[in-house]
Image (spheres, rainbow, N blue to C red):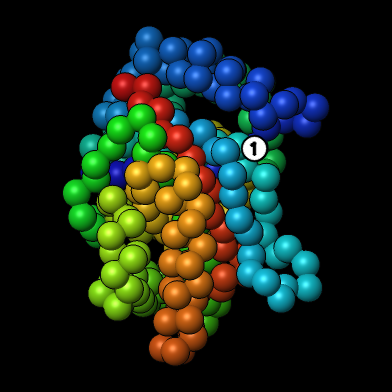
Amino acid sequence: MLTLIAAIRRKPGMTHRAFLRHLHQVHGPLAAANPLRIRSYVQNHVFDASFGVEGDPSYLTAFGRDSVTELRFDDLEALAATMSDPYSRDVIGPDGARFNDLPSALALLTRTDVVGPPRRSDADTVKVLHFVHGAQRLERDDVVDGWQSAHKHVVAEQTAQANAVRGWVQHRQVPGAEEALRHFGGSETVYAGVTALYYGSEDEALAHFPSYERALRERSEETGGFWDPSRSFALYCREVTIF
């Protein structure tokens, strides 16, 4: 199973609320009316975010994301067929251009690599999407392997973190489908992957994820550094399943 992940922001002059209304009430139903070969479609509506690390001379990553789309496909053939279909080209694409600031979009193709404890979801569940930019000297797989190891260490060593996280899913970036990714706009993918961490409430997410991220960064420094925290970011979201 492949997951296409796209983090986007609203067009200039558009409010966050208007963006989410169009995304959910107009764009989502258009996709649901003709799913083509999409296995599932999830919207993640962003309500808060964090970027870089304290001590940076300036923000080193593009920020201001309003939502993250997750589209799941059985394989590359299903992805290519969906993105090249006239419905995607003539209906979905033009509608997306009404709210998506295309030049700033960030899209990557991923494969689910590690799943943590079973996710327990209810109306209060908050999903934190952590986009990790790898250390420049490392290959992508080495970044993800170091990332997995650091996560396991932090959860094993810190009971509070282990108890707070309701679920953990890691998406490893995989090559391919560059033409399909351009459907969302943006440029070359520079992120090694994305993790989704689930918390029981907004307060739990805001209380625990910053300390989790700090512990992850400290572990990275102890082991030689697998990521670039200055160019990484986290998005606090409400998950909305379209189909």
Query: Relative to the observer, which residue lies in front, 141 or 113?
Result: 113
Disc 1 is placed on an element classified as: loop
Q: Is residue 57 left or right of residue 68?
A: right
At 44% from the left edge and 89% from the top edge, which residue is drawn?
222
Q: Is residue 32 above or below residue 201?
A: above
Residue at the outermost left position: 118
Q: Is residue 105 shown to the viewer in this render?
A: no
Occupied quadrant, residue 145 = bottom left
- Residue 75: x %, y % from top left: 26, 41
Residue at the outermost top position: 33
At 43% from the left edge and 67% from the top edge, which residue is drawn?
212
Q: Is residue 24 above or below residue 100?
A: above
Q: Is residue 197 above or below residue 159?
A: above
Q: Amino acid at mark 1?
A: Arg
Q: Quadrant of the N terminus?
A: top left
Q: Quadrant of the C terminus?
A: top left
Count of marks placed on residues: 1
Query: Relative to the observer, which residue lies in front, 7 or 81?
Result: 7
Q: Is residue 197 shown to the viewer in this render?
A: yes
At 37% from the left edge and 48% from the top edge, which residue is drawn?
199
- Residue 118: x %, y % from top left: 19, 49
User: How many neighbours does mark 1 have within 10 angstroms: few (below 14), some (14-19), or many (20 or more)?
Assistant: many
Q: Which residue is mark 1?
A: 9
- Residue 7: x %, y % from top left: 54, 42
- Residue 9: x %, y % from top left: 64, 37
Query: Relative to the observer, which residue lies in front, 58 or 189?
Result: 58
Occupied quadrant, residue 188 = bottom right
Q: Is residue 19 above or below residue 206?
A: above
